[in-house]
Image: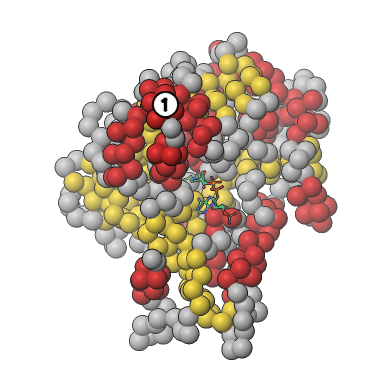
Amino acid sequence: MTLPLFERARRYADRTAIVAPEGEFSYGELSAAAESVATHLLDGRPDLGGERVCFLVPSGWSYAAVQWGIWRAGGVAVPMAVSHPTAELEHVLDDAGPTTVVAHPELASRLSDAATTRRLRLIDTQELTRSSSGGTLPTLAPERPCMILYTSGTTGRPKGAVLSHGNVQAQVESLSQAWGWTPDDRVLLHLPLHHVHGIVNVLTSALWNGAVCDILPTFRPLDVWERLASGGLTLYMAVPTVYARLIDAWDEAAPEKRSAWSLGARPCRLMISGSAALPVPTLERWEAITGHRLLERYGMTEIGMALSNPVTGERRPGYVGEPLPGVQVRLVDEADQPVPVGTPGQIQVRGPTVFGSYLGRPEETAAAFTPDGWFRTGDVAVIDQGAYRILGRSSVDILKTGGEKISALEIEDVLRAHGAVADCAVVGVPDPEWGERVCAAVVRRPASEVSEAELRTFAKSRLAPYKVPKQFLFVAELPRNPMGKVTKPAVREIFQSDTP
Ligand code: MLC
Ligand code: AMP
């Protein structure tokens, strides 16, 4: 017996699973490749027994084969972001404590020193998928952990959210039911594959349902338009910044291109937006261009998806709909008591889709849940005429830029490590392209002349590209309240009044 995901793949053996830069591959080929990867990773052992395997593999066929292979061997898959600098990759290695690291041949050099220092086995994807299969693979219970996804919190470096096979299956079953996935679906995937959005909502949902996952390794607006317009796609999912970029590309295109793109995108059955608030003007413009009213939904790394507008029925702009099947959602006050309908409250979520723990952080895990098992999202919403509307977050130090969640405090810690920085405050400033733009107010040390460019280079070598502030302002002092605490809203105002 194996997990339903792999059992189901047998049913679809001859159907296409993945179309990627490497070629077109059937479910049968994916299952066989996963067995090879698993056999190689096991190296004669019966079961990886929950060992973590970090992998740095671009979106595509190899990614899916490696992810499934780690799962089939009884390992926990820890996807690493291809866009991250070594310092971020090293944080994941140190926190996840893997035994083995898998890397695409073109990316292996980025991990070789780190792997050697940490005495980790570094395996190349080509070697893995070439090896022969055979032997028995372990039986996997749904409660076993399968994946660790790194996510920023208010404090410290990113934490690893541990998801079980059961969590992923519950998430996929909920979305399959709500969004009506069938084996005839074909979804376009260009989202990064170290987040729940790309991994669960797109890749795993497609593979669970016997559908085709059509992968573009990176997001390029013209490629996406051409792919949407070439027909055959039934589903498309992206973050609001992507829709904004696609709208810009459409506006800049020649009239014949515009009509071809608009016409070509129309037959797709469903287009979805999430990971950040979808501005109503973006929803309206997209509808005018393509005829599709985007279905907005709300989710989070720790819980998968929680709220969604309906496939059939009214999708109210600015609202994220209702709880998804199998997901319990409530709004509470500061004492964790449910608030009356119409009163804003913090979103809490419970059920089989919710993750188990943050790796190695029992205190943060305990603090994230109420005693009766509700996960505290930190997002605030209100129910208005039966649908949820997200109002914001309870912490000013969590930002969302282009669908990426980041911690202001993590960026401040990095900037403060620069010798010329006496103090700093990082804020998210509303931005039409990114949702929030990361901005840093910096107090330089006396006599320091450090430039914006120098600080940016410094930050870039230590942080993921999307965490690097887009704007720096040098200030004499930071605004503080009478208790001496930096007042972030006042810092944000400095940038808003500075924006031309
Ligand atoms: C890239 N940059 C960003 C950025 N992405 N800056 C801020 N925010 C981002 N999200 C930087 C680049 O490093 C570059 O910096 C500059 O901005 C322009 O880069 P680009 O090449 O134009 O950006 P691009 O690579 O096209 O990326 C933009 C994007 C990408 C929107 C396509 O960020 C993306 O795919 N975002 C989706 C993330 C996602 O999947 N989130 C889901 C999380 S799960 P420089 O200095 O080098 O020029 C979750 C739960 C849920 O949220 O509900 O789904
Ligand atoms: P992440 O931790 O990267 O998974 O990001 C999850 C966060 O993204 C949530 O806690 C919300 O703050 C935000 N988010 C996701 N979907 C939406 C949405 N539709 N509207 C507003 N915010 C959203």
Quarter of the image that includes the C terminus: bottom left
Structural crowding at the residue carrying mark 1, measured as other residues with C-alpha within 10 Å and reported as few (<14), some (14–19) or many (≥20): few
Depth check: give the residue in front, 89 or 100: 89
Q: From this view, report whether residue 86 is shown above or below residue 386.
A: below
Q: From this view, report whether residue 118 is shown above or below residue 47.
A: below
| Residue at position x 40%, y 71% in the image | 498
Mark 1: amino acid: Glu
| Residue at position x 64%, y 70% in the image | 454
| Residue at position x 60%, y 10% in the image | 14
Depth check: give the residue in front, 91 or 2: 91
Could you tell whether 469 is left or right of 449 in the image? left
Q: Estimate the x, y position of residue 200 in percent, counting from the top left.
A: 50, 35
Could you tell whether 437 is left or right of 164 in the image? left
Residue that badge 1 annotates: 256
Could you tell whether 417 is left or right of 423 in the image? right
Q: From this view, report whether residue 410 is shown above or below residue 476.
A: above
Q: Estimate the x, y position of residue 72 in percent, counting from the top left.
A: 66, 29
Could you tell whether 365 is left or right of 371 in the image? right
Q: Estimate the x, y position of residue 117 in percent, counting from the top left.
A: 82, 56
The part of the image, by quadrant, that contains residue 250 is top left
Report how many numbered discs are placed on residues in the image.
Answer: 1
Depth check: give the residue in front, 54 or 17: 17
The part of the image, by quadrant, that contains residue 420 is bottom right
From this viewpoint, is residue 369 visible?
no
From this viewpoint, is residue 499 visible?
yes
Q: How is the image coloured?
A: secondary structure
| Residue at position x 62%, y 77% in the image | 450
Give the structural element (helix, strand or loop) at label 1. helix
